[in-house]
Image (cartoon, rainbow, N blue to C red):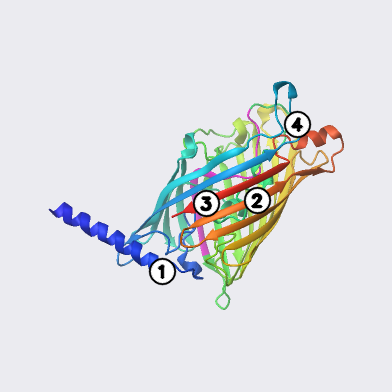
Amino acid sequence: MKRIILGLLCTSAITLSAQNNSEQGKPHEDVSSIDMENGVTGIADNRGFTLKSKDDKFVFKPYLFLQSQGKFQWYDSEGLDKAYNQDNVANSGFAMPYAILGFTGTTFGRVDYNLCINASASGGNILQQGWVDARISDAARFRVGKFKTPFFHAIHTTLGETLFPTLPTSLASTVIMPYSLNAVWPAIGTGFDVGVAFHGTARISRRRPWLASYEAGLWNGTGSSVNTATKTLSDDFKIPALLYASRLSFMPWGSMPKTQGNNHMLSGRHMEFGISGGINVESESESTNDTRVAVEFSMLYNRWYVGAEGYWMGVSFTDRQKIDEHLNYMGGYAQVGYFINRHLQGGVRWDVMDRNGRGRDGFLNSPGVVLNYYIDRLNLKVSGMYQYTGRWGHATQLDRDNDDLGIATHMATVQLQYSF
């Protein structure tokens, strides 16, 4: 009987919470009520339901995040072998990059947590995130588990709150190495990884709403597909062969939400300047030491969103490779989004990448356009984008042909996103 009564009470609590949130389903402008700490989707109070104690020290909130895409990609003829019926159209059709089920919340008023599974992934990527975050104060917090590494505004943006449905090409694409080394294909961008970080946000002025945010930590450096400890000591540096990374940002207008467009926030102003850097020791099958530095700017001003960042990656080879050359790669992008009305957001992006290194002439540039349509109360977002990848400045036609291998010249994507 006690179990039956307890079950009824729990069911009633969930129902009342869901009904209460449904009544609050009107769009709002209160940034503080939108929780983006989970890194997947902005969870507003009017989305789904929440279980919490009366003193708010214990909070439990489940969430669901789905993305389905229709893709069309057309590639240049360079690198295609017509004898094997290789077509210019490839990697096209339907895809489901994310099918995430997770829950997030707080315990004891001081320990935040998040766990989510991506059913569309395979291997170690199935565990998209899993971490606990202990708060001594807002300025001093520890996070342990699998979470985002402190690089790049594009990656730090909440997954469901990006302006474009795909990352900039300069971050997601591998660079071109002038040597034939097994499994050495680094990309400038980094994502989720297993590690530990010390981070926090502090107010630095009594009279102004100036905030400073920082994060510094250690990660395996093996990326989101590996959840096990596989690293050793560096032969060159005599330190653990890990990813050492940090980020520092300044917010002159108060807290900057991790969004590139949210139709619940169409008034107010937020701005952030950031710099990040790190070195991945003995990365890429213990063949290279990869150093990364990035600078970023982002702003939300009423219906406008503006974001830009530039980054550099230096690749040096470990002593065992017996290669003295140091390779340098650069990239960057700028993008602007605007809410035409509460349901419709348009945006443009220009992405540039020095994919073949500073030792050779030539750049890739990828202009793109996007249109996002938000269906209120149903938590649906429909996105349509087109991106063209061009080439310029190459010394020879062979360099030009090789530079965009594996990257679509024309890419169109239509995406339906649902979150709860």
Q: CA distance from mark 1 to mark 4?
A: 57 Å
State the residue at coordinates (83%, 41%).
Answer: 361
Chain-order first, disc 1 or disc 3: 1
Residue pointed to by mark 1:
24
The kind of secondary structure element at disc 4 is: loop
| Horizontal and vertical percent position of residue 141 | 46, 57
Chain-order first, disc 2 or disc 4: 4
Residue pointed to by mark 2:
385
| Horizontal and vertical percent position of residue 29 | 51, 71
Horizontal arrangement in the rendering, residue 266 relative to residue 72 (left or right): left
- Asked if the residue under mark 2 is in contact with the one under mark 3, i.e. CB atoms within 8 Å, the reply is no
Query: Could you tell me the amino acid type at mark 2?
Result: Met
Indicate which label's residue lies in the foreground, 1 or 4.
1
Q: What crowding class fits label 1: few (fewer than 14 Cα within 10 Å), some (14-19), or many (20 or more)?
A: few
Which residues lie in the magenta part? 183-201
Query: Could you tell me the amino acid type at mark 1?
Result: Gln
